[in-house]
Each structure stands twice: as C-alpha cells, then as structure tokens.
C-alpha cells in the first residue's frame, strides 16, 4: 500500500501542462524540420503545399512539392515513429526485467534484424525486401530466445534465462553478419551493409512508413492498455499475483509487443542504439516510475529526440551522418549524466 501511495503521489506531482507540451513537441519539431535542409523551404511554402494538397490553387513549384511530400515528410514521420517505438519498447523492457540497463535489443531482435538486412542486401532484394527480411529475422531471433528459455526454464529464474538466451542469440546473429561481410562484394555490397548497420533514414519513402505503421500499432496499443499493470511488476511477482495479475502472461505479452515495435523500427532505419536505453531514463526523470504517464512521455520524448538527431544528421555536414553514430555520441555522455544526477525513477 505504501508503494502504491508513493507512485500516486509522484504521478500527481507531474504537471499536466508539461506532458501536453512534450506530446505536442514532435509536431512542432516536425514543422521546423520541414524547413531545414540543403534545399530551404519557408513556412509559406509549406502552407501552400498543404493547401494545394487539399485542392486550393497555388503557384508552388514541383521541386518544392517533391522536397516536402516525397523526401522530408516520409523521413520526419519515420523518425518520429522509430523514436517512439524504440523508447516505448525500452521502457517496457526495463520495467518487465526490473533492470535500468536493459535496452530493446536485449532479446537479440536488433542482431537478428541486422542479419536479415545484410542477407537481403547481398542478394539485392531491394529496399522493401531489406525491410521485410530484417523484420522477419528480428522476430525469428526472439522466437529462438524463447525456445532456448523453454528448454531450460526449470534451471533458474525465467527472466535471467531469457536475458542470457537473448545474449546468446544476438551473438550468433552478429557472428553471421560478420561472416556475410567477409564474403560480400567489397566494392558494392560491403559498403551498403556497413552503412545500413550504422542506421539511416536517407532512403525512407512513404511506402516504408505505411509498411511499419500496422505492426507498430499492434505492438503499441496493448502496452498502453496494460501500462498500469507494469507498475505492479515493480513490486515483485508475489504482490502482483496477489492482486490477480498473471505475471508470466503479462511478461510474455509485453515482450512480444516490445519486440514487434523494435523489429518494425529496425527494419526501415537500420541499427540505431541508445534511444531505447537513454530516453526511458529521461522520461522517468520527468514523470517518475508510474507507467501511466511514463509510456506516453517516453513516446513523445523519443520521437522528438530521434527527429532532432535525424535533422542534425542530414544538415550538419555536406555528407549525411549515420544516425547510429550520432545517437551514440549524444546518448553515452547524456546517459552518464542521467545516472549521476537523477535516480528518482528507480527509487
């Protein structure tokens, strides 16, 4: 009862206006990102483009329309969706495993998706084939982790077994990726594989966005509906079970949904680290550990963060910087700062 009271007090202390601002932030940043790039676009051009999209007459050039609708909007939407997916899955995994150092690739999903993408690149399956292959092998990696867990489930704590199984599966798929890189064409395939593994939204199109929206929605809705039950896992399995929660089933649902989100994100963006590890900590510093507000805030902050990083990646230098490099450079020192200055979320 005391723990429930603490969570309730922390939730009431969270400013509603602050949460509203955070939720609106990806939209505001998206408008700013539309104007930024090698081809500058004004707010007036954006207004004309959208009014023209709904039938109003304007004298906007085809070049500006192409930049807005075919290049920047798909990329902005993808960055927001991927940031949201990785952040929510990271927060869900950290709550499920009761470990602040857990990230979305804990069950080997990122390594599996990376192998699927490298396989598709070697056989020239195209962008759609890369996304489908990465998604399929990401889910396969999680299935293998669960299969290993079921084989030795009587040997110890199921959570620890799943983590160890994920490390094992991830190591195998990482080794397979290295093997493919060794035999790939060093002049064409190898650079494409290396660039994809560093993460990028350079070639994102609306068809890619349409492809990942359904699995992301399927993975996100159950997590949002069950987020209050994630609070109970923090109190321990016995207390959660005494309140009528089937902890094993809840963990299974959370893991499946979070994996679906992660696999969907990795399938179009490549390997982007640190987002699912750092952003949930930042959200806890704002809202506390209550998942009722933690998951929505993680979504908003994650989408905003990756959109900012992607905008910097395509505008900072003459050549585009891979997202994985920037998220690591920003995320590592920021994570150290959070660990040393904000322990509120895990107390």
Image (cartoon, rainbow, N blue to C red):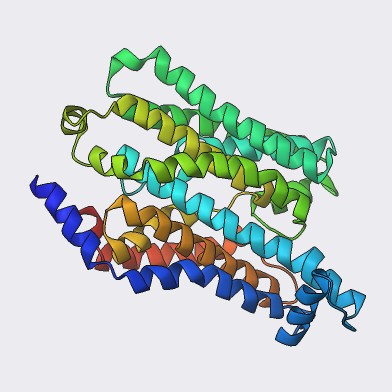
Q: Quadrant of residue 306?
A: bottom right
Q: Is residue 178 visible?
A: no
**Left or right, residue 271 beside residue 129:** left
Quarter of the figure that contains the N terminus: top left
Which residue is situated farthest in the left direction here? 2
**Left or right, residue 33 beside residue 100:** right
Q: What's the residue at 34%, 64% (across, down)?
A: 336
Image coordinates of residue 69 in percent, x first then y, are 79, 67
Q: Quadrant of residue 204?
A: bottom right
Residue 210 vs 119, above or below: the answer is below
**Left or right, residue 1 beside residue 340:** left
Q: What's the residue at 91%, 75% (across, down)?
A: 62
Residue 109 vs 72, above or below: the answer is above
Q: Is residue 330 visible?
A: yes
Image coordinates of residue 101 in percent, x first then y, are 35, 48
Number of callouts: 0
- Front-lying residue, 47 or 199: 47
Quarter of the figure that contains the C terminus: bottom left
Q: What's the residue at 41%, 13% (across, down)?
A: 151
Q: What's the residue at 88%, 79% (across, down)?
A: 57
Image coordinates of residue 311 in percent, x first then y, are 64, 72
Q: Quadrant of residue 289?
A: bottom left
Image coordinates of residue 148 in percent, x first then y, are 45, 19
């Amino acid at each position: 009862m005391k723990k429930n009271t603490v969570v309730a007090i922390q939730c009431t202390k969270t400013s509603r206006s602050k949460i509203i601002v955070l939720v609106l932030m990806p939209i505001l940043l998206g408008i700013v990102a539309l104007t930024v790039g090698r081809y500058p676009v004004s707010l007036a051009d954006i207004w004309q483009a959208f009014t023209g999209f709904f039938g109003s007459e304007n004298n906007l050039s085809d070049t500006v329309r192409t930049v807005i609708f075919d290049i920047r909007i798909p990329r902005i939407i993808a960055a927001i969706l991927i940031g949201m997916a990785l952040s929510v899955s990271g927060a869900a995994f950290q709550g499920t495993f009761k470990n602040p150092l857990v990230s979305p690739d804990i069950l080997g999903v990122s390594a599996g998706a990376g192998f699927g993408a490298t396989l598709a690149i070697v056989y020239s399956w195209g962008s759609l084939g890369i996304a489908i292959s990465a998604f399929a092998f990401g889910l396969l990696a999680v299935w293998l982790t669960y299969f290993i867990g079921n084989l030795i489930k009587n040997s110890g704590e199921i959570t620890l077994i799943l983590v160890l199984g994920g490390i094992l599966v991830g190591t195998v798929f990482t080794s397979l990726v290295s093997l493919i890189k060794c035999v790939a064409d060093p002049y064409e395939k190898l650079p494409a594989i290396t660039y994809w593994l560093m993460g990028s939204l350079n070639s994102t199109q609306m068809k890619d966005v349409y492809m990942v929206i359904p699995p992301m929605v399927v993975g996100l809705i159950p997590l949002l509906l069950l987020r209050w039950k994630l609070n109970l896992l923090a109190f321990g399995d016995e207390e959660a079970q005494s309140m009528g929660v089937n902890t094993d089933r809840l963990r299974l649902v959370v893991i499946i949904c979070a994996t679906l989100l992660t696999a969907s994100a990795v399938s179009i963006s490549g390997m982007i680290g640190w987002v699912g590890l750092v952003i949930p900590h930042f959200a806890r510093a704002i809202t506390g550990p209550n998942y009722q507000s933690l998951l929505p805030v993680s979504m908003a902050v994650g989408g905003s963060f990756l959109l900012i990083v992607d905008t910097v990646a395509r505008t900072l230098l003459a050549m585009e910087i891979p997202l994985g490099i920037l998220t690591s450079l920003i995320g590592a020192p920021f994570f150290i700062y959070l660990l040393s200055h904000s322990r509120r979320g895990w107390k």
